[in-house]
Each structure stands twice: as structure tokens, then as C-alpha cells.
Amino acid sequence: MKRYLVAVPVCLGLAFLAVPAKAAPINVMADACSGCHGTDGQSLGAMPGFNTGAPDAKSNAELKKLLRDYRSGAREATVMDRIAKGYSEAQLDAIVDYYKK
Ligand code: HEC
């Protein structure tokens, strides 16, 4: 009996996770990029930053094109192609706008 008392809440919890989530708020989607590209897209290491504020920083339009090309497969990548496919084009655009705001 004790086992069921534990299993039922666990199963209910898992069922809750299985419910399709609404689109995440933009800051949550954009935070997924920070782990690799640095906080606010300001990379400190070898990883390309996409909001460096440097004179050669890519424009909003360039970043959107890069992400769309990763998503479509037009641009080869090691990981960004797979990551970009996880978002719609509209979501990728929104992420760029979020970082470039
Ligand atoms: C697992 C690490 C990782 C995550 C997470 C990640 N990226 Fe990337 N990103 C890379 C790597 C590595 C590259 C270089 C291209 C390649 O080899 O995939 C790259 C390249 C890019 C570029 C091109 C930069 C340039 O100057 O050429 C952009 C823009 C970009 N990522 C945006 C994003 C956005 C937006 C997110 C979040 C949705 C994101 N990345 C999440 C690893 C990551």
C-alpha cells in the first residue's frame, strides 16, 4: 500500500509533464542560448557571441538569416542546425529581437 501512496503522486506529476506546454515566454526560450553563447549572448570565450556590442557585431537581420539557414540546413553546423530546428522561424526572430533589444 505504501508503494501506491508514493507511485500515484509521481504518476500524476509525470502526466502533468506530458501535457503539451504552451509556447514558452521569450526570456525562457532565449535563456536556452546562454549556456553556450554567454549571458545576454555576450560570449567571453571562443563561442561566437551574437550580441557583443563590438563594432563587428552582427546585425539583427544577419543573425535572423543565420538562424533560418541553420534551421533549413542551408548553413552547415555542428550543433546549431539541430538547435535551430527546435524553434519556428517566428520564434527564432523573436529570440534575436530579445537579445538585440
Ligand atoms: C550546445 C551549445 C549551443 C547552444 C545551446 C546554442 N548554440 Fe548557437 N552556436 C553554437 C555553436 C557551436 C555555434 C557555431 C556553429 C556550429 O558549429 O554549430 C553556434 C552558432 C550560433 C550563431 C552564429 C554566430 C556567428 O557569428 O556565426 C548564432 C546566431 C547562434 N548560434 C545563436 C543561438 C541561439 C539564438 C541559441 C538559442 C536558441 C543558440 N545559439 C544556442 C552552440 C550553441
Image (spheres, rainbow, N blue to C red):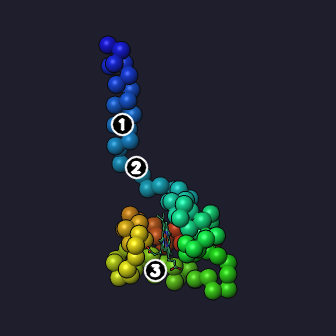
Q: Callout 3: helix, strand or loop?
A: helix
* Relative depth, front residue between 42 and 101: 42
Residue type at mark 3 is Leu
Mark 2, Cα crowd under 10 Å, few <14 / some 14-19 / many 20+, is few
- Which residue lies under the disc numbered 1? 14
Please identify the quarter of the rendering in which residue 14 is found: top left
Circle 1: element type? helix
Instruction: List x then y, in percent, for residue 55.
Output: 67, 86
Indicate the position of residue 39 as horizontal and vertical percent values: 62, 63
Q: Is residue 88 above or below residue 25?
A: below
For the residues labelled 1 and 2, the Cα–Cα distance comes to 13 Å
Q: Earlier in the sequence, mark 1 or mark 2?
A: 1
Q: Which mark is residue 29?
A: none
The residue located at (42%, 52%) in the rendering is: 22
The image quadrant of residue 79 is bottom left
Question: Residue drawn at (37%, 68%), measured in percent from left and top?
Answer: 82
Question: For the residues marked 1 and 3, what is the alpha-carbon distance in whole angstroms?
Answer: 36 Å
Q: Is residue 90 visible?
A: no
- Does residue 32 sit above or below 98 in this rendering? above
Labelled pair 1, 2 in contact (Cβ < 8 Å): no
Front one among 93 and 72: 72
Binning the other alpha carbons within 10 Å of mark 1 as few (below 14), some (14 to 19) or many (20 upward) gives few
Q: Residues within 10 Å of mark 3 (few under 14, many from 20)?
A: some
Q: Quadrant of residue 13?
A: top left
For residue 66, the mark is: 3
